[in-house]
Image (tube, rainbow, N blue to C red):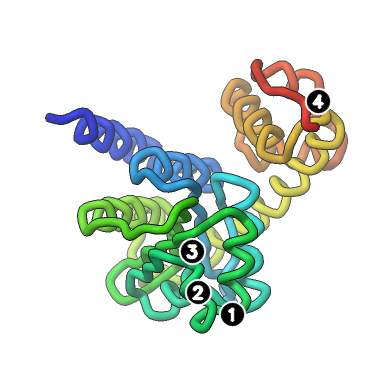
Amino acid sequence: MTISDQKARDVFVALADALVADFDIIDFLDVLCGHSVDLLGVTAAGVLLVDHRGTLNMVAASTEQARVLELFQLQNDEGPCLECYHTGEVVTCADIAAAAERWPLFAPAAAEAGFAAVHAVPMRLRETVIGALNLFGARPGSLNADVIGLGQALANIATIGILHQRTIRHDEVVIEQLQATLNSRILIEQAKGVLAERLQVTVDQAFVLLRRYARQASQRLADVAADVVDGSADVRAIADSASGLTPAE
C-alpha cells in the first residue's frame, strides 16, 4: 500500500466512522471539504445542497474565498457547480480564463478569488441528485480520471451521510434533515462573524475556533453557534480552545 493509498483509506475510514446516529451534518461536510483538499490536491472545496423548494444552498466550504464564490454562483445562477447539479454529471474546467463565454459572470469572479480551475462532482443516489461537491484549483490544469473517481467516491460518502442511510422513498425525512442543515449553516455563518469581530481573527480562523471548541465540549457545532449568536457563549473559552492563530491584519 502506497502512502497515498494509506491516506485515502484513513480518510474513508474516518468518514465512515462519522456516520453514526444523530451525527452532525454540518461538521461532517466541513471535514469532508478539508479531506477533499488534502486528498485530491486541490486548493479549496465546497458543498452545495438542495432544499425542499428545489433551491441550491451553500452548506460547507474549506475557505472563505470558496464560500463567497459558491454564493456568487447561486446568486447569479451561473457556474460549473450549478451545471453539475442540474445535469447530474461531472463538470470540469481546466482553465477558467478560457471559460468567459461559457460563464461570463462566474469566470472573472473565480479568477478574482484566486482560482484558475474548477471541477464539480454530483452528490447523487441513483437518479436523485441532492447537491454537488466542488473542487477549486489555484492553477490551471485537469484532474486525472483517478482523482475525479476519488472525488466522486467522497461525494458518494457525503450523500450517504446526508440521507442518513435512508432510502429515497422517505422524502419527507430527507427534506426535514436538509432544511435543518441549511438553518444550522446560517447560524454558523453568523457565529463566525461574531467571533471574528470579538476576537479580531479572520473568518476562517473563527471557524477553526468554533469547531474545535464544539468538539472539545462534545457539543453540536450548530448549538455552539447559536450560543455565540445569542450572547450566552463563553467567548474567552472558545478563544482558548486553539493556539497558534494570529490576529487578523
Circle 4 residues within 10 Å: few <14, some 14–19, many ≥20: some
In depth, the one of 26 and 44 nearer the eye is 44
**Label 3 SS:** helix
Which circle's residue, 2 or 3, is located before the other in the chain? 2
* Residue type of the residue flagged with mark 4: Val
At a point 67% along the width and 57% down the height, the residue shown is: 183
Quarter of the figure that contains the N terminus: top left
**Quarter location, residue 218:** top right
Q: Which residue is mark 2?
A: 82
Q: Which residue is mark 4?
A: 235
Residue 173 is labelled as 3
Task: Choose mark 1 or mark 4, whichever is in front.
Answer: 1
Which circle's residue, 2 or 1, is located before the other in the chain? 2
* Residue type of the residue flagged with mark 1: Pro
Q: Residue furthest left?
A: 1
**Label 2 SS:** helix
| In the displayed structure image, the side of residue 201 where residue 93 appears, left or right | left
Task: Choose mark 2 or mark 3, whichever is in front.
Answer: 2
**Label 4 SS:** helix
At a point 45% along the width and 60% down the height, the residue shown is: 117
Q: Which residue is mark 1?
A: 104
- Across and down, in percent, residue 28 comes to 48, 43
Which circle's residue, 2 or 4, is located before the other in the chain? 2
Which circle's residue, 3 or 1, is located before the other in the chain? 1
